[in-house]
């Protein structure tokens, strides 16, 4: 619960960290606001981008039910409650943000990584039961369930399991506590007024 120090209980805001490149930072300086576009995902991930785009599209659809999606936002901006989890590149800078809690969608990085790998999300028993079903169909690559139309019931089960990504969001906003160190915050935008500092 040490991460809870990042929560401003009085003002209902959270300190978050994000690594963004100079293009984003320049845009924030000139327009005072930044929203992510899908084309950046294509550029960032190259050949594997289609898989990520599918997962991001699912996230966009579901997360918009938690925090309203601005008309010009095409994808989410990833932030973390702990800067240790950031991947920072040479042309990027880490920003410390102070963000109103109602602008954030909270989830665990470990859960999101499972979705990016097209895996079932659940407790140990639920995951094992799902894997047992895959074995019955001789499926060795879990992503096959998502990427083909051959297993509609398994795909439905997979997508239902992904709903657990958001299981901590409501609890965090109610208790103002952060239950895990690897909590992420999905934002639809960054406003320049949210920037507290830049970290080299």
Image (cartoon, helix red, strand yellow):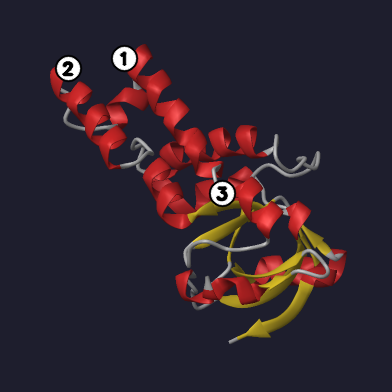
| Residue occupying image coordinates x 36% and y 25% | 147
> What is the spatial separation of the Cα atoms under label 3 and label 1, in whole angstroms?
29 Å
Point out the image quarter for the C terminus. Answer: bottom right
Mark 2 Cα shell of 10 Å, populated few (<14), some (14-19), many (≥20): few
| Residue occupying image coordinates x 31% and y 33% | 126
| Label 2: which secondary element | loop
Image location (x, y in percent) of residue 163: 51, 34
Residue hosting label 1: 151
Residue 75, compared with residue 180, is above or below; it is: above
**Visible in this render: residue 54?**
no
Residue hosting label 2: 137
For the residues bearing labels 2 and 1, Cβ distance under 8 angstroms: yes
> What is the spatial separation of the Cα atoms under label 3 and label 2, in whole angstroms?
33 Å
Residue 83, compared with residue 63, is above or below; it is: below
Q: Upstream in the sequence, badge 3 or badge 2? A: 2
Q: Upstream in the sequence, badge 2 or badge 1? A: 2
Image location (x, y in percent) of residue 15: 68, 72
Residue hosting label 3: 168
For the residues bearing labels 3 and 1, Cβ distance under 8 angstroms: no
Nearer to me, 12 or 15: 12
């Amino acid at each position: 619960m040490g991460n809870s120090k990042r929560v401003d209980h009085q003002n209902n805001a959270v300190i978050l960290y994000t690594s963004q490149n100079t293009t984003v930072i320049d845009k924030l300086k000139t327009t005072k606001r930044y929203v992510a576009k899908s084309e950046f995902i294509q550029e960032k991930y190259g050949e594997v981008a289609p898989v990520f785009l599918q997962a991001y599209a699912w996230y966009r659809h579901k997360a918009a039910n938690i925090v309203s999606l601005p008309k010009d936002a095409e994808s989410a901006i990833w932030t973390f409650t702990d800067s240790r989890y950031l991947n920072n590149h040479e042309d990027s800078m880490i920003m410390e943000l102070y963000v109103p809690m109602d602008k954030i969608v909270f989830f665990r990085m470990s859960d999101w990584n499972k979705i990016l790998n097209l895996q079932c999300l659940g407790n140990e028993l639920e995951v094992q039961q799902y894997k047992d079903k895959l074995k019955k169909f001789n499926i060795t690559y879990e992503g096959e369930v998502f990427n083909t139309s051959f297993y509609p019931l398994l795909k439905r089960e997979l997508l239902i399991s992904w709903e657990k990504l958001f299981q901590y969001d409501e609890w965090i906003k109610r208790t103002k506590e952060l239950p895990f160190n690897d909590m992420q915050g999905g934002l639809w935008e960054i406003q320049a007024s949210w920037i507290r500092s830049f970290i080299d």
